[in-house]
Image (cartoon, rainbow, N blue to C red):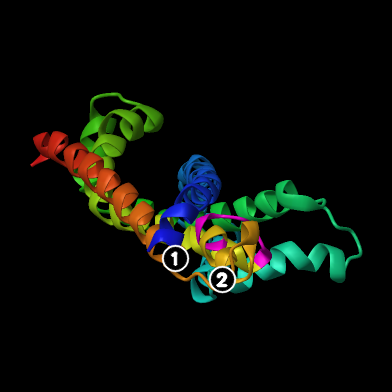
Amino acid sequence: MEQMMEQMPIVVHALNIGFIQTLKLFFVTLIGAFPLGLVIAFGSMSKFKPLSYCTKLIVWIIRGTPLMIQLLIIYYFPGLVLHNPIWGSGESGRFLAASVSFVLNYACYFSEIYRGGIQGVPIGQEEAGLVLGMTKSQIFFKITLLQMIKRIVPPMSNEIITLVKDTSLARIIALQEIIWAGQAFMKGSYGISGAIWPLFFTAVYYLIFNGVLTVLLSRLESRLNYFR
């Protein structure tokens, strides 16, 4: 116990650095996946069949394969197969590759949620808007979009909570996120080896962060109750 207390400041410092990396990956994914998912949703609903089929095929492939495999392919394929390591080297290169993988993966999941939310709005409301002389863009932003947001908040909340935990998969390409930082103490990080207890502390970080997100998303959902 005494040794653990002596090691505590070192462990907390390392976990904080790893958690910052986790937060960066989380927010970059959301910032990229939210708009890209909407674009993909429009592509899958397009009346231009080649675009619709191509978009649906991409979504099917991304949703049907593990994110871990996608990370490995996106990070290693350019360098090993094309002999063009576009991501560069070091932590910044790994973070960039991980960000691209996560954004693409979650954009495809978000696109299906968007599509369900848009198609769930009664068609009669769009027809009423056209009768009132509104353009299709006005109908989307003033009628469809607001109701879609209300419908997609619960499933989107689940995906966001899942994203928090999925960030740990980035360690497969040696991105030094919080799980990587905690696991490193089993291998000799900072002169500490054979210590498994730092991994239990990583769970506390996830629990607190997920708890904060759950409260915020619940409040958002309650504020959108005016559509009921």
Q: Which quadrant of the structure image shows residue 102?
A: bottom right
Q: Secondary structure at mark 2?
A: helix
Q: Is residue 121 left or right of residue 5?
A: left
> In the image as oriented, which residue stretches furthest toward the right?
83
Task: Write down the residue under mark 1.
Answer: 199
Locate residue 169, reporting x and y percent.
54, 65
Cα distance in 3D space between marks 2 and 1: 9 Å
Task: Write down the residue under mark 2.
Answer: 186
Q: What amino acid type is highlighted by mark number 1? A: Leu
- Residues at circles 2 and 1 in contact by the CB criterion of under 8 Å: yes
Locate residue 160, reporting x and y percent.
37, 52
Residue at point 45% right, 44% down?
34
Q: Secondary structure at mark 1?
A: helix
Q: Earlier in the sequence, mark 2 or mark 1?
A: 2
* Few, some or many residues within 10 Å of mark 1 (<14, 14–19, 20+): many
Bounds of the magenta span? 173-180
Q: Is residue 202 above or below residue 148?
A: below
* Few, some or many residues within 10 Å of mark 2 (<14, 14–19, 20+): some
Residue at point 39% right, 59% down?
201
> In the image as oriented, which residue stretches furthest toward the top?
133
Residue at point 37% right, 51% down?
114
Q: Is residue 187 left or right of residue 114?
A: right
Q: Which quadrant: the C terminus?
A: top left
Q: Is residue 26 above or below residue 126?
A: below
- Residue 46 appears anywhere in the view: no
Q: Is residue 88 magenta?
A: no
